[in-house]
Image (cartoon, helix red, strand yellow):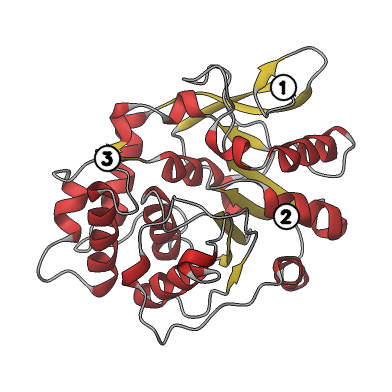
């Protein structure tokens, strides 16, 4: 089994990458964005989703993403503030963004069209949060949506709470239905979903004493590493009123799949989505790629290497 999409590894090197992220909550988003910024020269755009509400000021996730990319030296990668879904408790980096980091632009569709205009051919889209922005692009920029190769963290066939949908699907169920309808109608190529049962495993957890955390805290580490360590500290400490014992690398594993790396096995599967966003395999469903297993140890070696401030980022996407 594996991803049946026909782009070769060489072709993937030349395909621009868009990341759609709810960065600033669970630290796995920031770790994944950092790897992309360090390892993918063709990172073309970062858009944010589940943006912050009034208690944190407008569009704070986008400001944090801008600050992180600038710290890594990727000043040329645009950041666009995307969908707000109401007040969110999944945000813990209030004090980490300097006041002089400006608010970011908010035209997601225009930014995606700009990427499409600059890069003929396919465009990789890595979804690390709810699919609100993707659904909007499908609706408002169908010419760009037809070129997207989507890898989305989300969905579950056996979610740990059978009474509700997986987190990313649950936050915007209408967006999930819109995306699946677009696939069924041929307006969007079938995405690959890296599902909760494959990512919700202890083997990919980063904890306060994990080597990744320790290396980011090294006294001689660069500013981007200290920024990530401060973010991890706030997540572990329960900033915002909730305490989390670690961060599972859902989004890093999803990024690796989008990059064509050999850590996630997926297979075509017809999925049906119910009224509250739960997914089940069904002969009447829409055929998409669904993760079935992963090589966790190899993946974590890749993740640790590319987050080590003392190491040169590795992988097939570095020139």
- Residue 271 badge: 1
Label 2, label 3: how far apart the Cα atoms are: 35 Å
Q: Is residue 47 visible?
A: yes
Nearest the viewer among 115 and 92 is 92
Residue holding disc 2: 122
> 172 left or right of 236?
right
Picture layout, residue 100 above or below residue 107 = below
Nearest the viewer among 35 and 281 is 281
> 59 left or right of 204?
right
Upstream in the sequence, badge 2 or badge 1? Answer: 2
Q: Where on the picture, by quarter, is residue 20?
A: bottom right
Label 1, label 3: how far apart the Cα atoms are: 31 Å
- Residue 246 badge: 3
> 136 left or right of 57?
right
Q: Are marks 1 and 3 in contact (CB under 8 Å)?
A: no
Choose mark 1 or mark 3, whichever is in front.
3
Q: Are marks 2 and 3 in contact (CB under 8 Å)?
A: no
List x then y, in percent, for residue 299: 35, 38
Label 2, label 1: how far apart the Cα atoms are: 24 Å
């Amino acid at each position: 089994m594996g991803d049946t999409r026909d782009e070769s590894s060489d072709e993937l090197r030349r395909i621009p990458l868009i990341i759609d992220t709810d960065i600033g909550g669970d630290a796995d988003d920031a770790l994944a964005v950092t790897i992309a910024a360090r390892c993918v020269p063709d990172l073309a755009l970062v858009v944010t989703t589940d943006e912050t509400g009034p208690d944190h000021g407008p569009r704070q996730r986008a400001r944090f993403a801008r600050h992180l990319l600038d710290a890594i030296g990727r000043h040329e990668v645009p950041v666009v503030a995307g969908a707000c879904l109401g007040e969110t408790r999944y945000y813990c980096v209030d004090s980490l963004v300097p006041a002089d980091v400006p608010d970011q632009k908010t035209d997601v569709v225009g930014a995606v069209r700009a990427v499409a205009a600059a890069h003929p051919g396919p465009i990789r889209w890595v979804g690390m949060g709810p699919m609100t922005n993707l659904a909007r692009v499908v609706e408002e920029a169908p010419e760009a949506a037809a070129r997207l190769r989507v890898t989305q963290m989300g969905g579950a066939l056996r979610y740990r709470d059978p009474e509700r949908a997986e987190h990313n699907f649950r936050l915007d169920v209408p967006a999930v239905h819109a995306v699946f309808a677009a696939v069924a109608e041929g307006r969007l190529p079938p995405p690959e979903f890296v599902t909760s049962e494959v990512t919700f495993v202890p083997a990919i957890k980063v904890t306060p004493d994990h080597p990744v955390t320790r290396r980011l805290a090294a006294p001689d580490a660069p500013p981007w590493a200290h920024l990530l360590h401060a973010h991890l500290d706030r997540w572990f400490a329960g900033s915002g009123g909730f305490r989390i014992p670690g961060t599972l690398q859902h989004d890093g594993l999803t990024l690796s799949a989008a990059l064509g790396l050999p850590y996630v096995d997926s297979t075509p599967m017809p999925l049906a989505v119910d009224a509250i966003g739960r997914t089940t395999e069904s002969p009447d469903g829409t055929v998409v790629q669904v993760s079935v297993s992963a090589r966790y140890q190899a993946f974590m070696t890749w993740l640790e290497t590319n987050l080590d401030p003392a190491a040169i980022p590795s992988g097939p996407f570095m020139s």
